Image: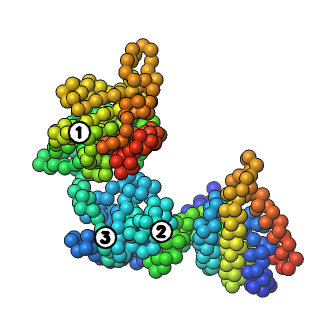
């Protein structure tokens, strides 16, 4: 063995790599140092001084201003859109697919893609300032079906969350097993908007899903969970005589919150809730909604099972929700539709609703 | 140093010794980023820029570091880490000083680190023992040649997107056929000048 040669090889490679990394660090220090930049939000309503060089999304998050984001800054979800009037630079190729021409004219940008390099002028909708971060404690967790878990998360003492029924929160996992990074995903709140000290979520196990696997296999009652929210424009409008609500799987969560909201506010609105499941074992919360139906004549519950097994003795509507929807909703007059579920189901239902005369501004949905 | 006019090297590396069409280097990004003309052209521009800079830098590294220190057996590794580091610094510098250019090329730069046309140009330059000016012009010519080839392919693929191709012919298959025909056409240049 020629130790001198090995030593020389390792030594020279280490030296060259070392020098190059040093150069890169130096370059980073010099080139990526944009000094202190001032962010002017909503025409001077709020001014913050930040260290430049990072993405706008993370810079704002460090200042406790949370823009919605589902992909974690990879330019794949397009949720972190923000209006930047000055200081954003040219539109980047990574942003192009998410910003249509009309939004380009209004200077909408993806906050995760643009870097803070100079002073910037931003417009951030007022309700986003309501978005906060909560370190909650998981106080209860139960199986609703073989693949859907119910979670109750309590806010730290003294804190409260104000959300509109139908909105969602972002749920952050901790690294586990082979997953070395924190991941976060969006989940609708299933509890009542009138309860401010805790929230409930319904999380279905997605095979191979990083976060749902974490919830279903790692998370235990008593654990701490980081959440941020509330987000989303799926919430009660209530300018109608009847609400047609459609959900599949864990899409029931925001609908449950909406139903309680209408009841608690004492609104004079009829509600018709179509709940789609593949088999009888996918159904849950049936007794609870049957009870609401008994107590409140303005609420009708229509669970549909696509392919019931003979031994289940299923007597309700069979087939997809689309079948029941076609039969039981006559027209779109003075009606609003609220949908939450998989894209396939939602698109089919939206087509039917449009045929029935629902206009697009009266169809609200949350696809996942 | 071979006695060839650097200008001849420059022209030859575009036409007769084209990176893609005669050496078949950089094929991966050539095939995968050529469905849209605009994007392909952006990548071509970025490759050209990086090729010129890496040829110059790697020539200096080879002449003043690798040869004197007797590290020729490590040249592949050294060239690659030099390219990777250069691209990193280049990206930061572009972001700072030429944000418009960075907006266009930024997403391609990390891709280019692993483009074999870049390492290929450096290795050819070493094997043929080019001088500094020859190396830089070889890098520039190779880059322009690559840019030309990917732009031509992308322009044709944009037209072909609406064409009725026989089943199994769309995508990579037709791209390979187009590339082959272009390569044959480029042989026509070899009567003008050839370099080894």
Q: How far apart are marks 1 and 2 (CA)?
A: 46 Å
Q: How far apart are marks 1 and 3 (CA)?
A: 39 Å
Residue A286, how many percent across, how many down? 29, 25
Q: Distance between the residues labelled 2 and 3?
A: 18 Å
Residue A284, how many percent across, how many down? 32, 27
Q: Can you tell which quarter of the image residue B179 is in?
A: bottom right
Chain letter of disc 1?
A
Q: Name the residue under label 2.
A: A92
Chain letter of disc 3?
A
Residue under the point 47% across and 68% down: A92
The C terminus of chain B appears in which quarter of the rendering? bottom right
Q: In this view, does A124 lie above or below A86?
A: above
Q: Can residue A80 be seen in this view?
A: yes
Is label 1 in contact with label 2 (beta carbons under 8 Å)? no
Pick whichever, B101 or A163, lies toward us: A163
Residue under the point 39% across and 18% down: A314
Q: Is residue A61 above or below residue A306?
A: below
Query: Which numbered disc covers residue A269?
Result: 1
**Secondary structure of the residue carrying numbered label 3:** strand
Pick whichever, A134 or A6, lies toward us: A134
Pick whichever, A343 or A214, lies toward us: A343
Residue mark closest to the camera, 1 vs 3? 1
Q: Mark 3 points at which residue?
A: A122
Label 2 Cα neighbours within 10 Å, binned few <14 / some 14-19 / many ≥20: many
Q: Which residue lies furthest to the right in this view?
A: B191
């Amino acid at each position: 063995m020629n130790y001198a040669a090995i030593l020389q090889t390792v030594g020279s490679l280490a030296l060259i790599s070392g020098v190059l990394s040093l150069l890169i660090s130096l370059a980073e220090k010099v080139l990526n140092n944009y000094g202190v930049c001032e962010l002017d939000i909503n025409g001077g309503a709020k001014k913050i001084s930040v260290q430049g060089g990072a993405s706008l999304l993370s810079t704002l998050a460090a200042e406790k201003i949370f823009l919605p984001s589902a992909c974690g800054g990879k330019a794949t979800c397009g949720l972190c859109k923000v209006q930047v009037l000055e200081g954003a630079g040219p539109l980047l190729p990574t942003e192009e697919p998410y910003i249509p021409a009309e939004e380009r004219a209004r200077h909408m940008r993806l906050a995760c893609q643009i870097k803070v390099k100079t002073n910037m002028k931003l417009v951030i909708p007022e309700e986003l300032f309501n978005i906060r971060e909560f370190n909650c404690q998981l106080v209860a967790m139960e199986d609703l079906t073989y693949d859907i878990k119910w979670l109750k998360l309590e806010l730290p003492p003294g804190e409260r969350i104000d959300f509109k029924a139908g909105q969602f929160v972002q749920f952050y996992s901790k690294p586990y097993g082979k997953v070395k990074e924190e991941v976060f995903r969006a989940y609708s709140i299933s509890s009542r908007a009138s309860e401010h000290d805790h929230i409930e979520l319904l999380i279905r196990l997605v095979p191979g899903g990083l976060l749902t696997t974490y919830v279903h296999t790692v998370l235990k009652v008593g654990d701490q969970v980081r959440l941020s929210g509330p987000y989303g424009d799926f919430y009660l409008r209530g300018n109608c005589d009847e609400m047609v609500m459609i959900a599949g799987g864990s899409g029931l969560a925001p609908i449950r919150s909406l139903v309680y909201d209408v009841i608690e506010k004492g609104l004079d609105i009829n509600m018709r809730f179509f709940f789609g499941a593949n088999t009888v074992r996918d159904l849950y919360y049936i007794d609870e909604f049957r009870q609401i139906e008994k107590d409140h004549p303005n609420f009708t519950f229509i669970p549909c099972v696509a392919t019931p097994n003979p031994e289940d003795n299923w007597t309700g509507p069979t087939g997809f929700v689309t079948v029941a929807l076609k039969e039981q909703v006559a027209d779109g007059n003075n009606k609003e539709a609220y949908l939450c579920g998989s894209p396939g189901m939602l698109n089919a239902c939206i087509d039917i609703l449009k045929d029935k005369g629902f206009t697009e501004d009266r169809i609200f949905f949350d696809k996942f | 140093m071979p006695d060839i006019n650097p200008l001849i090297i420059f022209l030859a590396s575009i036409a007769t010794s084209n990176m893609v069409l005669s050496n078949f280097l950089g094929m991966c990004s050539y095939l995968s980023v050529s469905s849209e003309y605009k994007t392909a052209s952006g990548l071509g521009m970025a490759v050209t820029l990086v090729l010129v800079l890496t040829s110059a830098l790697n020539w200096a590294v080879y002449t003043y570091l690798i040869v004197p220190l007797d590290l020729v057996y490590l040249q592949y590794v050294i060239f690659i880490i030099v390219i990777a580091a250069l691209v990193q610094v280049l990206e930061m510098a572009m972001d700072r000083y030429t944000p418009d250019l960075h907006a266009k090329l930024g997403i391609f730069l990390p891709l280019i680190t692993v483009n074999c046309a870049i390492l290929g140009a450096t290795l050819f330059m070493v094997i043929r023992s080019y001088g500094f000016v020859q190396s830089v012009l070889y890098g520039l010519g190779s880059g322009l040649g690559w840019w030309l080839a990917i732009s031509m392919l992308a322009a044709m693929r944009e037209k072909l997107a609406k064409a009725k191709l026989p089943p199994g012919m769309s995508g990579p298959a037709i791209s390979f056929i187009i590339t082959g025909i272009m390569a044959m056409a480029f042989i026509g240049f070899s009567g003008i000048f050839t370099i080894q």
